[in-house]
Image: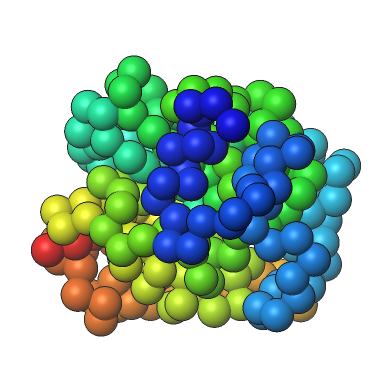
Amino acid sequence: MTDTALQRALDLLTDPPADPDVGKGYLDLLGRDESTPKNTGAIQKAWASPVGSMLYDRAQLLNRRLIAASRPPIDWLRIPAGGTALDVGCGPGNITAALARAAGPDGLALGVDISEPMLARAVQAEAGRQVGFLRADAQRLPFRDETFDAATSLAVFQLIPDPVAALSEMVRVLRPGGRIAIMVPTPGPANSFAFLARGGARWFAEDELGDMFETLGLTGVRTKTHGFIEWVRGQRP
């Protein structure tokens, strides 16, 4: 393997495989592993399908163009020149690529997702020397402690069976002083979208995600809600 983003990713793993599976353009660390809890709801199944991944891709792009509140706070993350950034639940990879651009020509951004169709789209659209993708479980990230300068996740935590485990993992791999920003949809005070829970989505109560941040020791925790979108930010001390 040449000195690509995937080669650099291997250097960050806790237990790098002797024979890395990169045949599809991303590093597959799961294979047929069925040992970890997965969301099997209708919403997750739809996004994980080839057609669903395409529709998700287009919907996300349109959403970010029209709704400024859903755009990731790239500047706030303060990714240093040549730094490393992590995108959990990267989907089609456009946010991962934006993190790489913020890190500069010597930086690295890695996107993690569990969906093979999503990762295939990400590889086709965004993979390169600074941008790499891995198929891995957010609830047990494969990286060593304190390997990333910044981490983000957009509209994914509501689909993760154990969001506390996923957040704990993101904090674990964040360097001291590193910043984290997570966006989740919220039903608001009227509980407007609670019925979607039947499709496998988990909706966060007001301040619930922010409380998780503080419980895990993050500092400067800020929660901001824009309609049905909630951003939570924090910093590892």
Q: Nearer the viewer, residue 113 or 67?
A: 113
Q: Residue at x 19, y 62 (%)?
A: 236
- The answer to whether any part of residue 221 appears in the image is yes
- From what the image shows, is residue 169 above or below residue 63? below
What quarter of the picture does the N terminus occupy?
A: top right
Tell me the residue at 48%/63% (across/down). 15
Q: Quadrant of residue 91?
A: top right
Residue in the foreground of this view, choosing between 9 and 118: 9
x then y, percent, for residue 101: 38, 23
Q: Quadrant of residue 50?
A: top right
Q: Position of residue 233 (x, y in %)?
A: 28, 56
Q: Which residue lies most toward the front here?
A: 18
The image shows residue 162 at horizontal and vertical percentages of: 54, 79
Q: Height in image: 136 above or below 8? A: below
**Residue sitting at x 22%, y 55%:** 175
Q: Is residue 28 above or below residue 80?
A: below
Q: Is residue 113 left or right of residue 207?
A: right
Q: Quadrant of the C terminus?
A: bottom left
Front residue of 11/45: it is 11
